[in-house]
Image (cartoon, helix red, strand yellow):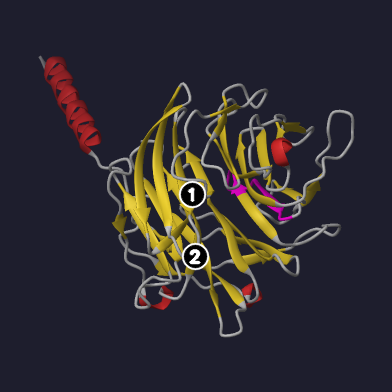
Amino acid sequence: MKHQILSLLLISVSLMLFSCADNSTPAPPTGWVIGQVSDADHVPTAKILKTGNGGASWTLQTLPAGCVGFQGNDISAVNGQVAWAAVGDPYHLDGGILHTADGGASWTLQALPDGLGNRCIKSIKGVSPTEAWAVSIRGDLLHTTDGGDHWTIVPLKKADDSIIPIQEVNRMDVTGLDIWIVDFLGGNLGVIHSPNGGITWRQEQLPDISQGGGPLSISAFDSHIAWTAVNSEGYLWGTSNGGQSWNKSNETIAGTADFDDICASSANVIWIAQNNGLSSGGVAARITVTNGNFESNLYSNVNYMMEGISAMNDNTTAWLVGFKTMFADPELPHGAIYFTHDGGVTWQLQILPDNARDVDLWKVSFVGARR
């Protein structure tokens, strides 16, 4: 009898624990956005904001004095404590890598190695609390495995030991051992890809590029599936075999402006942030792709050019950032953060703190998102 009572008690406790776990709500994710403030002489200073509650509130963080003169180019959230950011001056080819390991309470400019062609770091991807990849605007690739205490230069060598030249980088992405870089001026060979952790590299061919430009943004969902967009074309190019071949989508999305950022939240769902120019605003879209055909939720905004997007793998939740157009109401903040919880059907403006209303926002990254 005692054993029966004990068994019943254990079952009851187990059911209670299962019920509590089943009804629990995940904590709102942590995210960061990066941009810059420009003074009267148009000298930029990089700025970073953080949220710990999914964007219900944002806080402007304190950055080192060395960020004066640098634009905020990119940011990558690893977890609630660790993030990396890329900053730089593209005109004087100077810049650096910012790192936090305490949730942004402090940021440090990490030491870059000698031998760089330039120090304007354009894009960065943290893959763990200790490992990250970064690339300069002219194609200098950097790698760290010790939290950024040491960064090493990784040559872009083909299997025959020849070096792949890069003219102008805008974005990169990393999934496992696959590293993807896009050369904005590289034409149909502008996707630079290593499938083996940077040991060897190859140039991958994009078919049917009509404008003579090159890829501007890239996002990989896994080692097989990646998406890229070409400067001033409204199409997407996708691969499902790790870059062995790429296919152009059957349709354009919204005109032929730049897709400044894309984020693959699943194998066939891609989010885009489109910049239509200083006078026209921007577009965001959540795209479901089936056999090259698009089913899109489009969002247009005449006040802000859309520059960065970060989407969770639930395919419904994303954050979007941009900066103000020349014809927007002067009373509006310089930058804006939007949030969707319904797959891009509706977007909600999030509130910036008063001390960040002059920040032009550029890129966004949330913990748990692919971007």
Name the kind of residue labelled 1 in the image: Asn
Residue 367's spot in the image, x, y percent?
Answer: 45, 47
Residue 19's spot in the image, x, y percent?
Answer: 19, 31
Relative to 268, does residue 56 appear above or below in the rendering? Answer: below
* Residue range corresponding to the magenta coloring: 125-137
Residue drawn 51% across the image and 62% down it: 34
Say which residue label 2 marks. Answer: 278
Residue drawn 65% across the image and 27% down it: 243
Say which residue label 1 marks. Answer: 79
Q: Nearer the viewer, residue 175 or 130?
A: 175
Relative to 204, does residue 348 appear above or below in the rendering? Answer: below
Question: Quick one: label 1, few (<14), some, or many (20+) residues within 10 Å?
Answer: some
The answer to whether residue 20 is left or right of residue 223 is left
Residue drawn 29% across the image and 45% down it: 341
Q: How many marks?
A: 2
Q: Is residue 30 visible?
A: no
